[in-house]
Structure formats: structure tokens, C-alpha cells
Amino acid sequence: MDEDLVGASVDLFWLPLGAGGHFVRWNGRVYEWWSARRQHRAAADLYHCGLLLSLDNITYAVEMGPVWNVSGADRGVLAEGPVGSKWLGRFRAFRYEMRCWPGGCIPDIAEAVDSPLRTTEDPTRVAAVLNVLPEIPVLTWGRDELGAGEMWNSNSAVAWALARTGHDMVAIGPPRGGRAPGWTAGLVLASRQAGAMRSDCESPAEGQGAKGPRGRAT
């Protein structure tokens, strides 16, 4: 194991879309060509990301992937969700899983670009990421069920987890000239949840008013 990953840290890895597979890479290029044409911009390189978290001498691999592409019952599956549509999610071929795998690895990590990007070495923040990951929302991969303007995918999940744990999201982004589709969806959800939590803390419960000496509303 890389000595740089030992200790308290969160490291983000940017992997070219389709790393390790020509079919996914070709489809990604077609998708980006079409998206760029519709948005009247130049096509960009596409990336998806994963995390390696280190805490108390244990390294955790955090990534979203198909339920069938990694074997091992101890791979730290936190949640499963459908791909494309909830109906398709009834079939194993159309389900993804979110993993937080102690001692695990990120497939094709050798192809990562400008990586790793270390986001923190604060043990409290690393622990916060580990604690929030089991709360990952189970949304349909490839769909915009949030109305965020972007699909939900692996980038969304990573962005959500980092934003929920107080990372400086302005300083975190894909390699120069690249895009991370779905990243904004995770930020939008984290922002909405933070806003809801602030409202709950600042507003009195509905129907409650000031109380008199015997607990009667005044």
C-alpha cells in the first residue's frame, strides 16, 4: 500500500470515463459530443471519481459501480439502486451499488488523471465522511429525479458525501479541460439537505407557541 495513503486522509481519484473498457469509453464520447452540440460548447474529456479514505490504519475504497463488476461478499456494500429506471432495476444487470470497502480497491485506479487529490487530513472530517456514507440516497442512476439539471451517478454520490462533510467544494473539480457529469446533482442535494436542517433548527415546531407558567400556549 502507498505510504502516502496511511493515516487520516481522503483522496479523490479522477478516472477517464470508460477506463478499462472500450465500449463505455466510446458511448461516453458519443454522449459528450451530443451534449456539447446541444449546449453550443466544445466537447470535453469525461471523468468519474472514487475515493480512498484512510483512518486508524484502515483504507476504505469508496465507489459506485455495477453490482456484478466486483466480487467478494465483504466489499462493503452500503446501498443498491436501479440503473435507467426503477422497472429495469428489477434485473441484476441494471442495478448499481455504493461501496465503502475496508481494504478494498478502486478498479482501474492506475488510469487516474491528476490524482490523487487529497481533500483533507483531518481525522474528524474523515470520520464524518465514513459516517455519512450509509445515508447515501438511493436514486436512479442516469436520471434527474432531483430536478437538479444533471443525472445522478457516481460523481453525484462523491460530491454529495464531500459537501455534506464540510469540504471546500469550490477547490475540488475534474482535471483541466474535463467534465464530471452528475457532480452538480450531488451538490444540489447536499445544499437542499443543509438548508432543511437549518430550517429545522431555527424554526419552532408547527403549532407550538410561547408557553405560560403551566405549559399553556399564550
Image: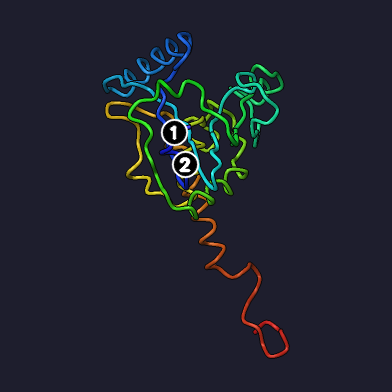
Q: Which residue is mark 1?
A: 2
Q: Amino acid at mark 1?
A: Asp
Query: In the image, residue 48 lies at what x, y percent?
Result: 44, 27
**Secondary structure type for disc 2:** loop
**Secondary structure type for disc 1:** loop
Residue 19 lies left or right of residue 204; in this view the side is left
Q: Which residue is mark 2?
A: 6
Q: Is residue 43 above or below residue 103?
A: above
Q: Is residue 153 above or below residue 207?
A: above
Q: Residue at x 62, y 81 (%)?
A: 210
**Label 2 close to label 1 by CB (< 8 Å):** yes
Q: Residue at x 51, y 27 (%)?
A: 106
Q: Nearer the viewer, residue 136 or 128?
A: 128
Q: Quadrant of residue 82?
A: top right
Crowdedness of circle 2 by 10 Å Cα count: few (<14), some, many (20+)? some
Q: Amino acid at mark 2?
A: Val
Q: Is residue 193 above or below residue 41?
A: below
Query: In the image, residue 57 lies at what x, y percent?
Result: 54, 44
Query: In the image, residue 205 lies at what x, y percent?
Result: 63, 68
Q: Residue at x 63, y 67 (%)?
A: 206
Residue 128 lies left or right of residue 113; in this view the side is right
Q: Residue at x 68, y 22 (%)?
A: 87
Residue 165 lies left or right of residue 96; in this view the side is left
